[in-house]
Amino acid sequence: QVQLEESGGGSVQSGGSLRLSCAASTYTYSDYCMGWFRQAPGKEREGVAAIDSDGSTRYAVSVKGRFTVSQDNAKNMLYLQMNNLKPEDTAMYSCAAGPRYYSGGDSYCLLSRFDYNYWGQGTQVTVSA
């Protein structure tokens, strides 16, 4: 069983930055893909960023170039650095763990919420204009 807990959310003005953290218990990064997801009121949960144990990453088009996902294997921590935040980034952000996939000997992570099994409770990010 993987337990995840997010922190670092808050309220910022447009153009500001936040760094989200996700603490994981009793698991190794080599076993899972790790992802960040967000859900705004009235909208479906969407994938923001994912990272594999080898450091390869995947981003949603809407955040590419502004957000950076990273992990500290020694501390079992996952991070999401969010720069140049926009009002449309306002949402509840959650971290998640899920299986990796393989194709032709290469592994990869997906950004669909259906591909992740373990979820944190979330941390709220609010960006004002």
Image: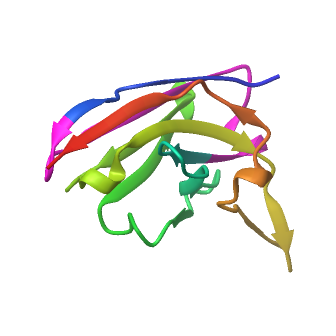
Magenta span includes 30? yes
Specify the farthest residue to the front: 42
Magenta span includes 65? no
Looking at the figure, which quarter contains the N terminus? top right
Side (left or right) of 12 relative to 100: left
Pick the front one: 107 or 40? 40
Span colored in magenta: 12-34
Residue 46: x and y, percent?
A: 58, 55
Q: Is residue 120 above or below residue 115?
A: above
Residue 29: x and y, percent?
A: 67, 39
Residue 7: quadrant of the picture: top left
Pick the front one: 58 or 46? 46
Q: Is residue 128 above or below residue 122?
A: below
Side (left or right) of 19 relative to 93: left
Side (left or right) of 16 relative to 51: left
Residue 54: x and y, percent?
A: 62, 57
Residue 116: x and y, percent?
A: 75, 46
Pick the front one: 80 or 120? 120
Q: Residue at x 31, y 68 (%)?
A: 65
Side (left or right) of 118 relative to 1: left
Q: Is residue 114 above or below residue 32?
A: below
